Image (cartoon, rainbow, N blue to C red):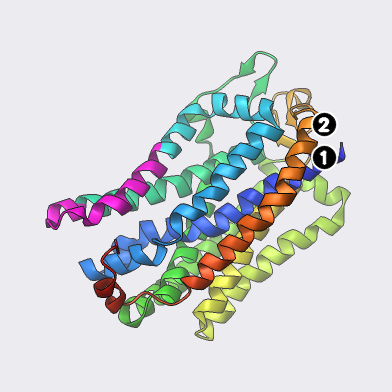
Amino acid sequence: MELQITWFVLWAVLWAVYFMLDGFVLGTGFLSGILAKSDTEKRLLINAVGPVWDGNEVWLITAGGATFAAFPTTYALMFSYMYTALLLLLFSLIVRGVSFEFRGKVEGPAWKQGWDRAIMISSFLPALLFGVAFGNIFEGLPMDAAGYHGSFLTLLNPYGILTGLLFVCLFAVHGALYGAVKTVGDLSARAFRLAKLLWMPLLLVAVIFLGTTAYATRLYGNYLAAPVLFLLPVVAVAALVGQQYYMIRQQPLKAFAASCVTIVAVIATGVAGLFPNLIPSTLDPAYSLTIFNSSSSQYTLAIMTGVAVLFVPIVIAYKIWVYRIFRAPVTERDLLENHEAY
């Protein structure tokens, strides 16, 4: 039982870190058409995320792999019930990576404009679809012994769409702040102004989401049973307010750090309310997929724990090193000096 709880926590951490890291890449991607006023500025934004975007995908692969290895029944049924949505998500992530790599291969304006649109669309769709997926996980799916009683359109329910909108707003502010930190001059100032403008819609959606969650889900049940958990949404709200505080004080780096905390705390808030469920059933709680009825054997979980203890610190150390190496803002001079730039 302890190993199931351990892997539930690790599962939550992997998703939270992934959204924190890839969130600014997705946000920068779908905001690039608004922020960039020239081809050079678009290249600056792409190269701001260029050294790190593919490394961030490691956390997505690990989160998916952890789901498969630790909770195989949940993995199998989730990919069955949400097949269309997850396939669309996968194709979007593939197109985004191809767009980054192919955009600069031909100098024609039509070629670049086409890939620019692809970057925007393939960055927006994952942000929305991840939110819709987690919204449905928080709310639960109509499933019983006969399987899933729904379709792709069933996933596009009001709460799922609201959660998708929350993710889009979170990543939009996150990406704009990252652009402000990682570029200089007019582009940086423009990104910072956009982050300030987007913060109020984010606050509005977050308030609606917190209120709607009380009626659409059973997430608050754990909080009422263990009031100490309310620290998680308090941290999320404090970090969200902290973004505005640092933006008013013209400190984009600190505002970006607050945005990182906001995303991690939001995911932690949802997952803490979900425990011990992985996918609740809206038809009958007896058919909910939990960390206990869908987990691997204790032997498998024990081996996985040993591997995680050994390799996760290495991955974290590597990521810290990469972000330290590429911590400086990207400038036009960097584009001219680096022939391998996007």
Q: Is residue 61 left or right of residue 102?
A: right
Q: Are the residues at dot 2 and dot 1 in contact (C-beta closer than 8 Å)?
A: yes
- Percent from the top left, x then y, of residue 227? 86, 56
Q: Is 317 included in the stretch rendered in magenta?
A: no
| Residue range (magenta) | 91-113
Q: How crowded is mark 1: few (under 14 residues within 10 Å), some or many (20 or more)?
A: many
Q: Which residue is drawn at 58% across and 72% down?
A: 257
Disc number for residue 109: none
User: Is disc 2 placed on a helix, strand or loop?
Assistant: helix
Q: How crowded is mark 2: few (under 14 residues within 10 Å), some or many (20 or more)?
A: some
Between 318 and 128, the residue placed more toward the observer is 318
- Percent from the top left, x then y, of residue 110? 13, 52
Image quadrant occupied by the C terminus? bottom left
- CA gap, disc 2 and disc 1: 7 Å
Q: What residue type is labelled 1?
A: Leu
- Residue at the disc numbered 2: 298
Q: What residue type is labelled 2?
A: Gln
User: Is disc 1 placed on a helix, strand or loop?
Assistant: helix
- Residue at the disc numbered 1: 3
Q: Residue at x 67, y 33 (%)?
A: 69
Q: Magenta stretch: dominant SS?
A: helix
